[in-house]
């Protein structure tokens, strides 16, 4: 939403500075409006329908993406670290992101936008079952 | 922290090498000062800068020292900004040595210690340089913690796996190293002002005269031939200098690789960290029946020089060596399972997209006469590419190994040990979802960290993963499709 607001503002400035080619402005405005609607309404709904996560006694699962969708699984026995991270926007809405890393840089599992208390519970659960510091296949 | 070990210095012969390297590194500045000196009529600038540069080179030796303690090795360096690098000894994954020409003339060698973490520039632990005779002892001491029982044997010769042969040179003329070197040389020449010097010079005038007499097309063709011949010669030379005398040996758990004619490089790999190997067959090497071999190993960067086991060599040699290393001949050369019609269709549509766009452009826009011929050539090339890519595609799973083959211009066959796989991803783009295929990605701590099986039918993706890693079998995603 924020990038689109910035883009709209930039177009407004452009229009004020230079208003000779009105049709170009119209095309740009329509494109921005359509893009904003798609990215503010459609994509979040789509993502919400796709995104899933689960922690079982053996593994962590996630499903994410919208155009490119990914299902990822990592065994808990190979987990190296569990990180929680809250950005300013996340804090505003009471959310948290949990990243579970393994010894492979390609194998990190990231669960985005969890409710804070759920995130805390997941982290506690993961650190409980994961024998962190054990066998990590390096 | 260990206090018992003494700080020791690098070889005193580096007092000769450091100033030379420093001067070579500062050549642009020196050239600048010489120009400045001749412009102002005061040559003292150049002399002063030269003295300072040599002084810095000498100071490097006096400010660098290292020590090997009980728990860690430390390297102290830096002239103005002091820096101490410490590595825990049980984290050392590999030790390699490297001797450039100047080092070799003085009997020196650089010892590099790697922990497998990304370490570049200042963060890299390199003893530059110690006396060559000292290197085997240092290597043994450094690896003692992680490779204890084998160090003594490591000094003995071991079993020979492969040795360089002059016939391997036939794979090198068709690489792009020569062209890259020519381009770099031309770029450097222009930066040093050769372009301006050529302007209106005798060379340019005679060049223009030749172009007038023979016509532009012939001149361009002749120039191309000259560049190509030069590139072939340079490629062969480069390959000869860097790979001649290559010899790959194995002692139980240690793999020794040594190569180079002028600049000698030695790598030691810990076999217990080997998780497989990659046979790479670039198109131009494959045409001549060659292949190269990379190690898939934890603690060794998967792409590039560090993991190379064999340069372009006969494919049978590469396969034999890999089979020997991983003790699984069927994974190395066994039949692969194909990915089915959907994957083949996707290869064709993707390859023919460019000719299709070009055809539309040809139809609407007016084009010169040769355009249709060029288009036909392009289409044939793309079709061949699609055919080859779909033929390459395949995988094989079972007995604890995952094997995947993809690509045409850069065909590769990745053999990865399943116990080393610590995560799976199944990725589908919009088009892949419509075609009912998916890309399966195995995450591992070794090599390039992720190995892909491209465009497998979506319902078999998790089956493959479950076959390789039993822990996937009972999982949620596998159950969804199982």
Image (cartoon, coloured by chain):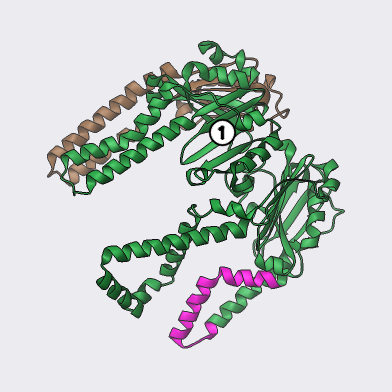
Chain colours: A brown, B green
Who's the residue at 71% across and 37% down the image?
B324
Which residue is painted at 60% across and 18% down in the image? B466
Q: Is residue B476 above or below residue B438?
A: above
Q: Residue, x 47% and y 53% (percent of image)?
A: B176
Q: Nearer the viewer, residue B406 or A92?
A: B406
Q: Chain of mark 1?
A: B
Asked whether residue B468 appears in the rendered view, the answer is yes
In this picture, which residue range is highlighted in magenta? B16-45
Find out whether residue B39 is within the magenta segment. yes
B472 sits to left or right of A88:
right
**Image quadrant in which the C terminus of chain A is located:** top right
Structural crowding at the residue carrying mark 1, measured as other residues with C-alpha within 10 Å and reported as few (<14), some (14–19) or many (≥20)? many
Residue A80 can be seen, yes or no? no
- Queried whether the magenta region covers residue B205, the answer comes back as no
Task: Name the element at disc 1.
Answer: strand
Where does the image place residue A86, in percent across and percent down from the top left? 52, 29
Q: B142 or A85: which is nearer to us?
A: B142
Instruction: Return the x and y of residue B217 as percentages of the image width and height.
Output: 28, 62
Q: Farthest residue in the bottom direction?
A: B41
Viewport quadrant of the N terminus of chain A: top left
Spot occupied by residue B15 in the image (x, y as percentages of width and height):
71, 72
Q: Foreground residue, B355 or A98?
A: B355
Counting from the top left corner in percent of width and height, residue B146 is at 79, 41
Image height of B123 relative to A48, above or below: below
Q: Main secondary structure of the magenta part?
A: helix
User: Which corner quadrant of the image does residue A118 belong to?
Assistant: top right
Q: Is residue A127 left or right of residue B225?
A: right
Closest to the observer, A132 or B242? B242
Mark 1, residue position: B450
């Amino acid at each position: 939403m924020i990038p689109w607001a910035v883009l709209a503002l930039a177009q407004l400035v452009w229009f004020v500075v230079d208003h000779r080619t009105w049709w170009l402005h119209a095309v740009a405005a329509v494109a921005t409006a359509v893009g904003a609607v798609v990215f503010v309404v459609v994509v979040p709904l789509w993502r919400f329908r796709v995104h899933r996560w689960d922690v079982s006694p053996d593994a962590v699962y996630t499903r994410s993406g919208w155009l490119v969708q990914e299902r990822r699984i990592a065994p808990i026995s190979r987990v190296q670290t569990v990180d929680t991270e809250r950005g300013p926007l996340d804090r505003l809405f009471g959310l948290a992101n949990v990243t579970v890393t393994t010894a492979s840089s390609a194998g990190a599992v990231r669960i985005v936008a969890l409710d804070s208390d759920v995130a805390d519970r997941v982290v506690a659960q993961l650190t409980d079952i994961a024998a962190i510091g054990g066998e990590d296949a390096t | 922290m260990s206090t018992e070990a003494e700080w020791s210095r690098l070889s005193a012969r580096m007092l000769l090498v450091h100033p030379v390297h420093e001067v070579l590194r500062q050549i642009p500045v020196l050239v600048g000062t010489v120009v400045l000196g001749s412009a102002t009529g005061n040559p003292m600038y150049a002399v002063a800068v030269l003295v300072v540069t040599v002084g810095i080179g000498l100071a490097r030796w006096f400010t660098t020292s290292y020590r090997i303690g009980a728990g860690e090795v430390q390297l102290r360096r830096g002239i103005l900004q002091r820096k101490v690098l410490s590595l825990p000894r049980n984290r050392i994954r590999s030790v390699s040595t490297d001797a450039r020409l100047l080092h070799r003339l003085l009997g020196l060698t650089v010892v590099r210690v790697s922990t497998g973490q990304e370490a570049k520039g200042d963060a890299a632990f390199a003893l530059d340089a110690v006396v060559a005779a000292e290197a085997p002892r240092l290597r043994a001491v450094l690896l003692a913690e992680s490779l204890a029982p084998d160090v003594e044997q490591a000094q003995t010769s071991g079993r020979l796996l492969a040795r360089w042969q002059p016939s391997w040179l036939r794979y090198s003329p068709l690489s792009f190293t020569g062209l890259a070197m020519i381009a770099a040389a031309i770029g450097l020449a222009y930066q040093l002002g050769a372009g301006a010097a050529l302007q209106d010079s005798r060379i340019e005038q005679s060049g223009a005269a030749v172009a007038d007499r023979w016509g532009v097309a012939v001149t361009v063709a002749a120039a191309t031939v000259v560049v190509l011949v030069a590139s072939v010669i340079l490629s062969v030379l480069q390959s000869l200098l860097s790979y001649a005398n290559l010899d790959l040996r194995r002692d139980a758990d240690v793999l020794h690789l040594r190569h180079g004619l002028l600049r000698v490089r030695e790598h030691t790999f810990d076999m217990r960290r080997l998780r497989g190997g990659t046979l790479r067959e670039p198109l131009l090497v494959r045409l001549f029946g060659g292949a190269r071999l990379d190690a898939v190993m934890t603690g060794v960067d998967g792409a590039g020089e560090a993991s190379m086991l064999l340069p372009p060599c006969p494919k049978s040699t590469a396969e034999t060596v890999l089979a020997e290393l991983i003790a699984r001949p069927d994974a190395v050369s066994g039949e692969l399972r194909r990915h089915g019609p959907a994957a083949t269709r996707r290869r064709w549509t993707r390859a023919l997209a460019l000719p299709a766009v070009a055809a539309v452009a040809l139809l609407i826009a007016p084009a010169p006469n040769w355009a249709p011929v060029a288009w036909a050539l392009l289409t044939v090339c793309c079709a061949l590419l699609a055919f080859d890519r779909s033929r390459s595609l395949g995988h094989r799973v079972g007995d604890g190994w995952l094997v995947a083959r993809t690509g045409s211009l850069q065909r590769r066959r990745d053999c990865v040990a399943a116990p080393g796989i610590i995560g799976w991803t199944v990725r589908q783009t919009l088009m892949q979802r419509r075609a009912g295929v998916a890309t399966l990605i195995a995450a591992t701590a070794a090599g390039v960290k992720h190995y892909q099986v491209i465009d497998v039918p979506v319902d078999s993706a998790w089956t493959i993963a479950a076959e390789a890693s039993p822990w996937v079998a009972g999982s949620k995603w596998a159950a969804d499709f199982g």
